[in-house]
């Protein structure tokens, strides 16, 4: 990860720390106000407004920009949120970096990533302020953190817990709408907030402020200015909520992000497309009913992978005439890097490329080498996440496992 990308994380870290403080504030009780009188009045009114709304909906957008001499970076995301108390919500995100749909129906909370055809689920939170935990830090950008601030049981206490001082900066008219401008100095981050005046005190904009200090290796005195803006539109406290708004219908091909490699045993193998080094694409499902498939997840820098590969190759070769296909799935590297490695070791294997780790994630791979044996019925039979220390031990073990599979097949035919 480059230095600028590391800095981009700083804004998230600071905002996440704010969220931790906000959650704690709902448990610790009210503290003395750290705001001046006008700011206090605006935030109290906003807190009462949000707390009294049994349902609401709002759209949000977040833009983050890094002004850096070495490599500027930008991030943009659009969100649509619908809430129904006490613990139902739906949130969709559209961003060039990722897309997802999240829903909590009161029983469970699910997030689905359509581009990866992947999901994760957990029990529904008992209160809205604890939503989004199913996501973790996977996509928790600064916009989502401030969206979650709106979901806290007591918005006033949540804000008061994160600041050292809150001051009133006056009234501004933006687009014909009169807005209160509030400034907050926080322990982790400073920010400004614009709130509508009148009976419906909607939050319209939040402007976090953070500077990333120079780090070792940067030009002397170089600081990276990280600017971010979160804007809210289309507020309503009377949204039409269609049936199923808080449910997600998962495609049958979707895989569980929380599943481990070991969890796959005795389950149908996840659907996956393998892009081969020669440019062809193979669907794993095409082997169902015809071949046993062995997947060897590896990387060129992995020493145990080098020890395992020839053993896997010899074990599969012994059963190839019976219908066994081996795919050595390289994870996280380019075709050029893989070709250079293969020129040195010259294995007799079919190599597939997984440069972004999508296939590895489908199979719950967390370490290399990892092996998966899929039966002709498409069910995962055996997995391995380590190479036995004894020379040749893996080869012998794979031969026993493959032999047992074909023996079972022969018995079922009789």
Image: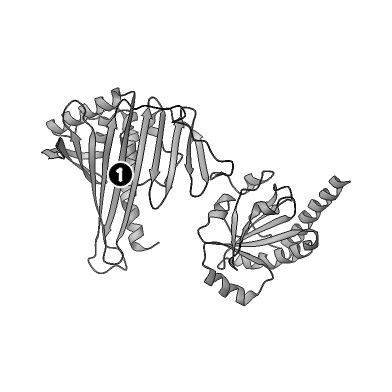
Q: Position of residue 304 (x, y in %)?
A: 62, 64
- Which image quadrant is residue 205 in? top left
Q: Position of residue 221 (x, y in %)?
A: 22, 66
- Which image quadrant is residue 223 in? bottom left
What colouring does the structure picture have? one colour
Farthest residue, direction right: 414
Residue toward you, 405 or 27: 405
Q: Is residue 229 above or below residue 37?
A: below
- Which image quadrant is residue 322 in? bottom right
Q: Residue at the location (61% across, 77% down)?
A: 344
In this figure, which residue is indicated by the disc labeled 1?
61
Farthest residue, direction left: 170
Q: Position of residue 282 (x, y in %)?
A: 63, 58
Residue 134 seen from this side:
yes
Residue toward you, 123 or 291: 291
Q: How many marks?
A: 1
Residue 21 seen from this side:
no
Q: Position of residue 232 (x, y in %)?
A: 27, 39
Secondary element under disc 1, as helix, strand or loop, is strand
Instruction: Give the left or right position of residue 212, taking residue 376 as reference.
Output: left
Q: Quadrant of the N terminus?
A: bottom left
CA neighbours of label 1 inside 10 A, class few (<14), some (14 to 19), many (20+): many
Instruction: Give the left or right position of residue 13, taking residue 118 as reference.
Output: left
Q: Residue at the location (61% across, 48% down)?
A: 270
Instruction: Give the left or right position of residue 387, taking residue 219 as reference.
Output: right
């Amino acid at each position: 990860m480059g230095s600028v990308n590391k800095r981009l994380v700083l804004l998230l870290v600071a905002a996440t720390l704010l969220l931790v403080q906000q959650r704690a504030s709902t448990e610790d009780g009210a503290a003395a106000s750290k705001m001046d009188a006008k700011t206090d009045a605006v935030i109290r009114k906003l807190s009462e407004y949000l707390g009294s709304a049994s349902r609401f909906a709002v759209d949000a957008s977040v833009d983050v920009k890094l002004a850096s001499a070495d490599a500027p970076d930008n991030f943009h995301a659009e969100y649509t949120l619908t809430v129904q108390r006490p613990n139902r919500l739906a949130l969709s995100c559209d961003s060039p970096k990722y897309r997802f749909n999240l829903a909590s129906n009161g029983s469970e909370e699910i997030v689905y990533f359509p581009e990866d055809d992947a999901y994760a689920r957990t029990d529904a939170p008992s209160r809205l302020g604890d939503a989004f935990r199913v996501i973790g830090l996977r996509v928790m950008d600064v916009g989502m953190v401030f969206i979650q601030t709106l979901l806290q049981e007591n918005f006033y206490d949540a804000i008061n817990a994160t600041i050292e001082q809150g001051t009133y900066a006056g009234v501004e008219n933006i687009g014909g709408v009169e807005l209160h401008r509030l400034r907050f100095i926080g322990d982790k981050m400073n920010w400004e907030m614009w709130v509508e005046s009148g009976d419906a005190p909607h939050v319209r904009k939040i402007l976090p402020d953070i500077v990333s200090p120079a780090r070792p290796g940067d030009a002397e005195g170089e600081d990276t200015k990280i600017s971010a803006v979160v804007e809210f539109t289309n507020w309503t406290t009377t949204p039409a909520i269609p049936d199923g708004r808080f449910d997600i219908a998962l495609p049958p091909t979707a895989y569980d992000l929380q599943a481990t490699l070991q969890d796959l045993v005795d389950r149908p193998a996840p659907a996956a497309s393998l892009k081969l080094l020669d440019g062809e694409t193979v669907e794993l499902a095409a082997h169902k009913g015809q071949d046993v498939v062995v997947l060897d997840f590896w990387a060129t820098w992995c020493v145990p992978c080098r020890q395992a590969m020839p053993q896997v190759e010899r074990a599969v070769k012994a059963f190839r005439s019976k219908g066994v296909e081996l795919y050595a799935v390289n994870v996280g590297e380019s075709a050029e890097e893989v070709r250079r490695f293969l020129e040195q070791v010259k294995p007799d294997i079919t190599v597939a490329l997984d440069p972004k780790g999508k296939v590895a994630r489908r199979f719950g791979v967390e370490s290399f080498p990892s092996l998966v044996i899929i039966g002709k019925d498409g069910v995962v039979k055996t997995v391995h996440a380590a190479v036995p220390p004894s020379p040749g031990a893996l080869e012998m073990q794979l031969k026993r496992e493959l032999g047992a599979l074909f023996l079972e097949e022969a018995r079922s035919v009789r």
